[in-house]
Image (cartoon, rainbow, N blue to C red):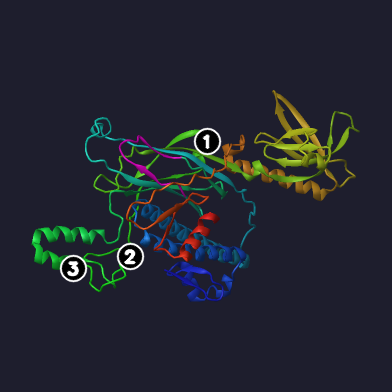
Amino acid sequence: MFCRNQTSRATVARGSALEMEIRRGKFRQSVFMETPQDSDIQKKIDYEIRMREGACKLLAACSQRDQALEASKSLLTCNARIMAYMSELQRMKEAQVMQRVARRSSDAGPMDDRSPCKGKVAISDLRIPLMWKDTEYFKNKGELHRCAVFCLLQLGGEIFDTDMVMVDRTLTDICFDNTIVFNEAAPGFELRVELYSCCSEDDCSAGSTPRKLASKLSSSLGRSAGKKMRASLEPGACSPTSNGGGATILLPVPSVPGPKYHLLAHTTLNLSHVQDSFRTHDLTITGNEECSYWLPLYGSVCCRLAAQPHCMTQQMMSGCLRVKLGGEPQGWTNVYGVLKGTNLFCYHQKEDMEANVEPVLTIGINKETRIRAAEKDPQSKAQNICITNQYGGEEVTHTLSADSREDTQRWMEAFWQQFYDMSQWRQCCDDLMKIELPSPRKPAIVTPKQGSLYHEMVAPASGEGLLLQDNAVSAEIRALLSSYYNDR
């Protein structure tokens, strides 16, 4: 349960320690004045709630199995995003309170404001091996058990899903070709990968179970009694599965009719798992052979997990410098310096950098680099910056000079921040890992079945589910869901 402050629209968990402190009067509601970040997250929550309502209506209107599976997958993703956004908003509110308390505390010591840069984390080439029995895979015996599966991936407040894949004993691996990129990851990130499964043999229509039961009862009880039983089980006007009649349904009907996905396995990946290659990771299996959605997993997942810290891809500092070339006292040259990745690039002028001209000098900035500030002379207020590296067993020092002491301090702070980012992102700063942008997915072609309502499947650009265009679905719902997937 969540309660919302009507003034600031801030979300606070009911029964949490934070709410209890507010009730005791230690924190005022004014602490929760809405910030731009709060407003953005609140808009995302409201947006996902509207999408969830549309997905529920869409799921209720589906009459074909594949469409119902896709709609149920979209509904699960919406619910996961709503919960993630609410948790993110809660953490932000608690951080605001703690920050205000720390500022007002008289005995609070000096606080270290240095924090590591964010970065991109990409996961691709997901492969989950299967372990079928010999009689099932090689001898093709037994029932052909088929399941619809997909992966849900969460890093912080970002949640993505993969394509849905149909799996049976003809496959040795569950393969997801999606490349999913998280853009605002911290070095302490935890990427949770969840595998969901749904037995595709289960009938996806909401009223199918009572009808099947009625047919069996009708044949076993006789024509007269069976006819009465069938009439009582038919959905009526007040039932959630039809628009006519008034009979009650004996069997319970779920709040959202249709297929249900279940968590089959999961794992959590972090910075230690990042490597610019294909690796295998342990998978925790939650299902068992008695479950209808069960698949014989091998207990591992293979993928490529890469990361690009912003310090490796963006300019962390730039400006005019003077660099000493050669050993002569007058051998100073004006350059435009750019700190990016593991190098300090020195150009003749800023325009050369913008035109991608080769730099005049490239000075390495890595974990082994030593940097110190030294006075030019006793009568000067400015300082030099000495950068020392090892090249082929020989120690080489480059001397830089800024226009003022303030500029020198800014450059030194940029260097210290760069070293701090490298220490936090570790192996991700050795070399720039390659991340390929996700490619648009091809639309799926589905042929409408004879005698059913006319359906047309539309694949959105992001590929997060297929949208159903059905005579039973209003144009408003179609437009709403279409905009949702296009935005994704």
- Which is more toward the observer, 160 or 454? 454
Which residue lies at the image location 44% right of the left edge and 70% below the top edge? Answer: 14
Question: Which circle's residue, 3 or 2, is located before the other in the chain?
Answer: 3
Which residue lies at the image location 51% right of the left edge and 55% below the top edge? Answer: 485
- Which is more toward the observer, 213 or 78? 213
Question: Which circle's residue, 2 or 1, is located before the other in the chain?
Answer: 2
Q: Label 1 is placed on what type of residue?
A: Gln
The residue tagged 3 is 231
User: Circle 1 — which element?
Assistant: loop
Which residue lies at the image location 18% right of the left edge and 69% below the top edge? Answer: 232
Question: Which circle's residue, 3 or 1, is located before the other in the chain?
Answer: 3
Q: Label 3 is placed on what type of residue?
A: Ala
As measured in the structure, the alpha-carbon distance from the residue carrying label 2 to the one carrying label 1 is: 44 Å
Q: Which residues are magenta?
A: 161-176
- Residue 275's label in the rendered image is 1
The x, y position of residue 407, in whole percent, is: 80, 48
**Residue 194 visible in the shown view:** no
- Looking at the rendered image, the disc whose residue lies closer to the viewer, 2 or 1, is 2
Q: Label 2 is placed on what type of residue?
A: Ser
User: Circle 3 — which element?
Assistant: helix
- Which is more toward the observer, 152 or 423? 152
User: Circle 2 — which element?
Assistant: loop
The residue tagged 2 is 255
User: Crowding at label 1, few (<14), some or many (≥20) Cα neighbours within 10 Å?
Assistant: some
The x, y position of residue 158, in whole percent, is: 51, 53
Residue 330 is drawn in which quadrant?
top right
Which residue is at the far front? 450
Residue 226 is drawn in which quadrant?
bottom left
The x, y position of residue 484, in whole percent, is: 51, 58
Q: Do the residues bearing badges 3 and 1 touch, measured as CB atoms within 8 Å? A: no
**Residue 478 visible in the shown view:** yes
